[in-house]
Image (cartoon, rainbow, N blue to C red):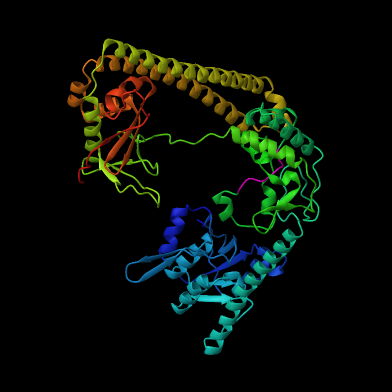
């Protein structure tokens, strides 16, 4: 049975058993920074290294292992200059670092275990171009591993060691010089206003930095997208849908190679096997277009700024571009946590000086609140516990004694708040209905034009199915949000009823309440609690303006009151 017919597990067992202990491997590396050099070719390295092995009577391993080698020959496409700088320190004064080349790492690991007698490289710079990998090779040599080089021979003398040092130094220096030349060329080109990177969609990339001509098909559509976006009446999804209707597609690109393709036996024309695909624009790609200064006739400069370009002409004017940015800023929405920890009074208590929030955190079964105040904050009260706040609020609630007219006023104001919430909820429901209508129209369009979309290449069968699944998922999500909104409003109505009952005997109910129930009562009455030194300040919600006269002991005889009130007291030690 040959190694090709064996499973990977069986091959690894053969290697570990010592079946190839007297055999050699051949390692070929295609560099990413020296593509014009003949010795950079995998075919050239393979032919020269195998010829050298036969000439020296070296027994090549008849080993084929997927992702590693074929007939004892390892081929890898990776830079030998890039080096991982992260270090890990372990027991026994061990220092570790990461080897970026996966096949080279597996090779030196097998050589270190003595599973192979040695390895053949074309020359030193095909083996390594950085000091870290150089150290690994030298340690293997000292351990007795036979490392051969087709184009060089190093004597086991001080002169041979010097020869090896010089080759390693020049191999690394070659990459440093190449990197420096590329950096200087790019910097000089940017100073002259040239486009040193790939031009975005709307321009043609002809392999020349000096000229990036307009794409005659896509450029007019992009100009129209900017004009529509400036009106503020088109969402990103609407613009993406319009672009698809106009036949707009993104420039064809190849997908990224999978791990299996990266580890496969590399040939010079391997990338030609991965076909470039044109994809339809999405809301995200439209947003990237609308926020790219490149379309105003500018290119990135050396100082992270945008300078006038000498490589391409503008598609839109600066005035139109700025108008689009203002419209996009109006539609920005903050991102919130999907799951917020349900700690009591979260986000309600703030520092009265700098306004920083007191963040709740449990410790040893007690809920504490800590504030990371600003540098110049004069408030020295950085940490409190829940009982302190609950006791101070309890002292306020003990003052609650209401007449029938005041109870009626509180109920009326609470009902007003409910009406406002209901109006906002209805607006969100209407927005959801509009969104559902658009999604249904999109689904109907996809169903009705399935064959034309597939034939034009705007969609692949997989992307079409994925698009339909995404729209259906969004439709279900909107429906679930509407159900949650109905439940939330019903709970709010229940809270209002409970509040009406609570005001009958608030102090007694608050004193007998559990911590989480006290937190609910506090949130119902107060919109904000602030702490400055040992003073608790508060704001009442709109529906509880009538309570402020009960809380404020410093109200003047004319009835004039300020909206913020304070209760002083000492904070218990933690």
Compared to 135, does 15 lie above or below?
Answer: above
421 horizontally vs 464: left or right: left
Quadrant of the image occupied by residue 113: bottom left
State how many labels appear. Answer: 0
Q: Which residue appears at 36% of the width and 18% of the height?
A: 492
Q: Is residue 551 magenta?
A: no
Q: Is residue 57 visible?
A: no
Q: Main secondary structure of the magenta part?
A: loop
Q: Position of residue 464 (x, y in %)?
A: 62, 29
The magenta segment is 250-256
Q: Which residue appears at 37% of the width and 66% of the height?
A: 89
Quadrant of the image occupied by residue 277: top right
Q: Is residue 434 visible?
A: yes
Q: Nearer the viewer, residue 102 or 308?
A: 308
Q: Nearer the viewer, residue 430 or 330?
A: 330
- Residue lying at the far front of the rendered structure: 557
Q: Position of residue 315 (x, y in %)?
A: 78, 41
Compared to 259, does 458 lie above or below?
Answer: above
Quadrant of the image occupied by residue 275: top right
Q: Position of residue 345 (x, y in %)?
A: 31, 33
46 horizontally vs 363: left or right: right
């Amino acid at each position: 049975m040959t190694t090709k017919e064996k499973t990977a597990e069986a091959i690894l067992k053969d290697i570990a058993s010592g079946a190839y202990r007297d055999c050699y491997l051949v390692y070929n590396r295609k560099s990413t920074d020296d593509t014009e050099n003949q010795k950079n070719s995998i075919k050239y390295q393979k032919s020269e290294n195998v010829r050298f092995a036969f000439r020296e009577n070296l027994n090549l391993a008849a080993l084929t292992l997927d992702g590693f080698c074929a007939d004892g020959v390892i081929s890898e496409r990776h830079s030998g200059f890039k080096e991982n700088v992260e270090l890990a320190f372990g027991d026994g004064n061990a220092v570790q670092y990461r080897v970026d080349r996966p096949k080279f790492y597996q090779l030196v690991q097998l050589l270190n275990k003595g599973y192979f007698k040695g390895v053949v490289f074309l020359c030193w710079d095909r083996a390594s171009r950085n000091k870290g990998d150089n150290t690994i090779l030298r340690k293997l040599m000292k351990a007795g591993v036979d490392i051969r080089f087709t184009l060089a021979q190093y004597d086991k003398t001080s002169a041979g060691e010097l020869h090896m040092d010089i080759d390693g130094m020049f191999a690394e220096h070659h990459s440093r010089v190449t990197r420096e030349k590329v950096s200087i060329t790019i910097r000089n080109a940017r100073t002259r206003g040239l486009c040193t990177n790939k031009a975005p969609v709307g321009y043609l990339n002809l392999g020349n930095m000096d000229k990036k001509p307009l794409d005659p098909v896509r450029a007019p559509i992009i100009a129209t997208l900017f004009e529509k976006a400036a009106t503020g009446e088109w969402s990103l999804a609407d613009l993406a849908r319009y672009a698809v209707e106009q036949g707009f597609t993104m420039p064809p690109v190849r997908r990224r190679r999978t791990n299996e393709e990266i580890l496969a036996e590399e040939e010079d024309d391997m990338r030609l096997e991965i076909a470039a695909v044109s994809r339809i624009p999405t809301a995200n790609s439209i947003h990237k277009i609308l926020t790219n200064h490149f379309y105003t006739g500018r290119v990135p400069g050396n100082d992270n700024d945008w300078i006038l370009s000498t490589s391409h002409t503008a598609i839109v004017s600066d005035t139109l571009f700025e108008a689009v940015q203002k419209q996009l800023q109006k539609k920005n929405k903050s991102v919130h946590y999907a799951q917020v920890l349900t700690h009591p009074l979260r986000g309600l208590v703030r520092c009265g000086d700098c306004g920083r929030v007191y963040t709740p955190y449990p410790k040893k079964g007690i809920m504490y609140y800590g504030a990371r105040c600003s540098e110049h904050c004069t408030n020295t009260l950085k940490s409190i516990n829940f009982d302190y706040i609950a006791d101070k609020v309890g002292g306020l609630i003990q003052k609650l004694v209401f007449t029938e007219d005041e109870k009626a006023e509180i109920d009326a104001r609470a009902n007003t708040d409910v009406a406002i919430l209901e109006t906002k909820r209805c607006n969100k429901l209407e927005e959801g209905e509009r969104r559902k209508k658009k999604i249904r129209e999109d689904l109907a369009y996809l169903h009705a034009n399935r064959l034309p979309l597939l034939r034009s290449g705007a969609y692949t069968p997989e992307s079409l199915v994925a698009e339909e699944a995404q729209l259906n998922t969004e439709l279900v999500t909107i429906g679930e949000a509407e159900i949650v909104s109905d439940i939330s409003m019903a709970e709010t109505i229940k809270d209002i009823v409970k509040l009406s009952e609570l005001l009958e005997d608030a102090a007694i109910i608050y004193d007998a309440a559990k911590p989480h129930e006290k937190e609910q009562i506090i949130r119902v009455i107060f919109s904000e609690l602030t702490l400055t030194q040992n003073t608790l300040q508060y704001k009442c919600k709109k529906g509880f303006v009538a309570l402020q006269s009960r809380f404020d002991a410093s109200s003047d005889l004319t009835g004039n009151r300020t909206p913020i009130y304070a209760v002083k007291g000492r904070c218990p030690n933690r």
